Amino acid sequence: MKPGQRLWTREELILAINLYSKLPFGKFHKNNAEVKKLAALIDRTPSSVGLKLGNLASFDPMLQARGIKGASNASKLDRAMWDEFYGNIETVAFESELLRAKRELRTIDSILEDEPDLNEILSVTGKEREQLVKVRVNQSFFRKMVLAAYDDTCCITGLQQPGFLVAGHILRWADDEKNRMNPHNGIAINALHDKAFETGLITITPDYIIRVSSELKKKGASEKMEELFIQYDGKAMHEPKKFWPNPEFLQHHNQTRFRL
């Protein structure tokens, strides 16, 4: 370690992974406004934070599988915190949001300002409210994480309008509690095609090819059906820059929910 440098703490690393999760790949540099903001919060330089984000990228298994490597000088603590964060993401992601809010001198409720049912959440008290706030904060975190991975781009159409996009689950929220917050179980998709994906009218194969159900390709399909769905059949999905969809999750969707 160079003179004047200090070791990263667990809390600082949790905040760094929090930011890594929310930034598009390729935007981890020192000039990024969010990098500068975190650097100020933890009293480090933007260069130091940017380097740490690059180190974290070296642990992403789906990036490794595609031959994409981050920086090579990550520490054992970096690895341990990565494993803790994504191995217990429902708990640690919420902890990271609490830590960020505390550093910014605001309450955890402020994260939920854009929630349509905020008044309903705040009207509940005790343990019920605590649990509801945690669920909502984690849902917000999951959305930010997935949309950042796709750089606010629909994986089916290429639409780049965040207000129209949702963070869809491949394995349903209700069916697989363990993978509710897993970023490899998420796709950025517009609301219309998310409904079609949910109901099995479209799917994505394990090699990331879009398939459209024969129910939508019946003879005499309308021009609008061609425009909205059929034209995408057989095309490659718009690829994320990190947190690629798990092929096993896509295979499960293909086999159990897609309506051939």
Image: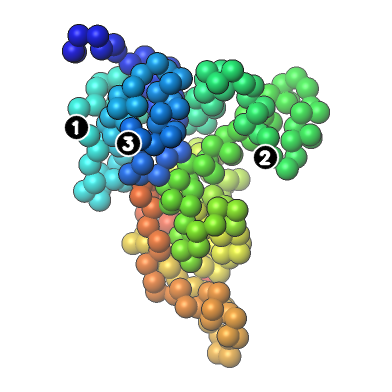
> In the picture provided, is 49 more to the left or to the right than 128?
left
Q: CA distance from mark 1 to mark 3?
A: 16 Å
**Percent x, y of residue 257:** 53, 62
Give the amino acid type for the residue marked by disc 3 in the picture. Answer: His
Secondary structure under the numbered disc 2 in the rendered image: loop
**Residue 204, quarter of the rendered image:** bottom left
Q: Is residue 125 above or below residue 185?
A: above
**Residue beneath label 1, please?**
72
**Residue shown at 54% from the left, 26% from the top:** 97
**Residue beneath label 2, please?**
114
The answer to the question of whether label 2 and label 1 lie on touching residues, with beta carbons closer than 8 A, is no
**Percent x, y of residue 185:** 46, 47
Give the amino acid type for the residue marked by disc 1 in the picture. Answer: Ser
**Percent x, y of residue 114:** 67, 39
**Residue shown at 42% from the left, 18% from the top:** 42
Local crowd at mark 3 within 10 Å, few (<14), some, or many (≥20)?
A: some
Q: CA distance from mark 3 to mark 2?
A: 28 Å
Secondary structure under the numbered disc 1 in the rendered image: loop
* Residue 99 visible here: yes
Badge nearest the viewer, 3 or 2: 3
Disc on res. 29: 3
